[in-house]
Image: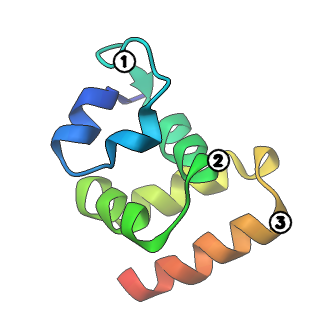
Amino acid sequence: MEFVTVSTLIKNGAPLGLFWNTADKDRPIEKNRMIAHTLKRGFNERILAVYVDIFGAVAVKKAIDEYKNDLSGRFYTDVCRALKAFT
């Protein structure tokens, strides 16, 4: 299991506004959970592009597949469709 911190994502280009209410930006969070749930909070192609740059398209797809039950069907389909542009 891999972990990532919010501060690492911000340093690599993720928008600070996505994490405005995160109190501890240096707390390690499981990578796939972070990817799926932050995309759920603020999905757009710019954020998806940052995540693909940081983690790779395969890792992003794996994360949303792992947390598919926490996501709406339409959201899952939209992210998968947008990911095709990166593969």
Quarter of the image with the N terminus in it: top left
Q: Residues within 10 Å of mark 1 (few under 14, many from 20)?
A: some
Amino acid type, mark 1: Pro
Q: Residues within 10 Å of mark 2 (few under 14, many from 20)?
A: few
Name the image colouring.
rainbow
Amino acid type, mark 2: Glu
In the image, 16 versus 73, the foreground residue is: 16
**Pointer 3 or 2: first along the chain:** 2
Q: Which residue is mark 1?
A: 28
- Which residue is at 72% across, 66% downward? 75
Q: Which label was assigned to residue 66?
A: 2
Q: Secondary structure at mark 2?
A: helix
Q: Which residue is mark 3?
A: 73
- Which residue is at 46% across, 21% downward? 22
In the image, 15 versus 74, the foreground residue is: 15
Please identify, in this view, whether the residue under mark 2 or under mark 1 is nearer the observer. 1
**Residue 87, visible in the rendered structure:** no
Q: Are marks 3 and 2 in contact (CB under 8 Å)?
A: no
x%, y% of residue 34?
Answer: 49, 36
x%, y% of residue 11?
Answer: 16, 40
In three-dimensional space, the C-alpha distance between marks 3 and 1, rounded to whole angstroms, equals 28 Å
- Which quarter of the picture shows residue 9? top left
Quarter of the image with the C terminus in it: bottom left
**Pointer 2 or 1: first along the chain:** 1
Q: In the displayed structure, would residue 70 be above or below residue 8?
A: below
- Which residue is at 41% across, 42% downward? 17
In three-dimensional space, the C-alpha distance between marks 2 and 1, rounded to whole angstroms, equals 19 Å
Q: Secondary structure at mark 1?
A: loop
